[in-house]
Amino acid sequence: MADLICRDCSSPISRQSKTGRCKPCSARFINASPELTAKRKAGIKRYHAQPGVRERCAANFAEYNRNMPPEHREQRRQHGLRIAREVLARPDVLARSNSPEAKRKAGAARTERLLGWCPPELRDRYRQLCASQRLSAAEARRIIEAEIPGTVEHGKRVVANHILQGQLRHERQQRDAY
Ligand SMILES: [Zn+2]
């Protein structure tokens, strides 16, 4: 039997090919089709929606980042520099990233990244604590978290309040005994 060939470029392909195309042609074919890319996107989304997948990906990524080989680190740095030079500096891209809409979106994303843990109604207080009271961000966060039910700090505060109440009651009883 004759070797199978890619239906787009006639290079030889393996018998296992389901699409009848070589790898690059298959990628080109899928990328050119809105339905196929939508299907692929939905598949990726479904995969990441499974419990634990996001956490596992984040942990793997963080682990790799900590131990990244120096060559790869340098390669990524160069890639970033090239993107900044060749893409981000393009006038059309600059115009888009400086639009009020884009800036608002970026600001909101930044707030969410930094303050996602903090309920919106406590954010101003957190900012005040950081700005005015010479606290580190971590200390300010612990103070705020003591106000958020369900956090460890809140639990500790509830317990501490309970113990303090017990002590005060005990002291009053001692006082009243005389
Ligand atoms: Zn091909």
Image (cartoon, rainbow, N blue to C red):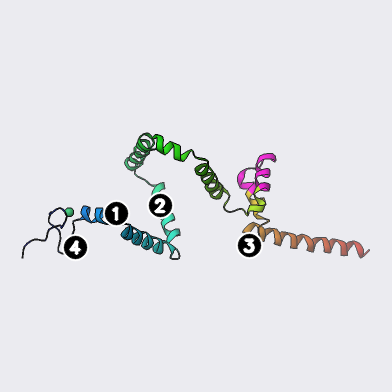
Alpha carbon separation for disc pair 3 and 1: 46 Å
Q: Which residues are magenta?
A: 124-140
Residue at image mark 2: 61
Mark 3 and mark 4 residues within 8 Å of each other at the beta carbon? no
Circle 1: is it few (<14), some (14-19), or many (20+) Cα within 10 Å?
Answer: some
Q: Amino acid at mark 3?
A: Gly
| Residue beneath the point at 31% across and 60% down | 36
Mark 3 and mark 1 residues within 8 Å of each other at the beta carbon? no
Could you say which quadrant of the image residue 8 lies in?
bottom left
Alpha carbon separation for disc pair 4 and 1: 18 Å
Residue at image mark 1: 31
Residue at image mark 4: 17
Give the secondary structure at mark 4: loop
Dot 4 or dot 2: first in sequence order is: 4
Mark 4 and mark 1 residues within 8 Å of each other at the beta carbon? no
Q: Nearer the viewer, residue 67 or 2?
A: 2
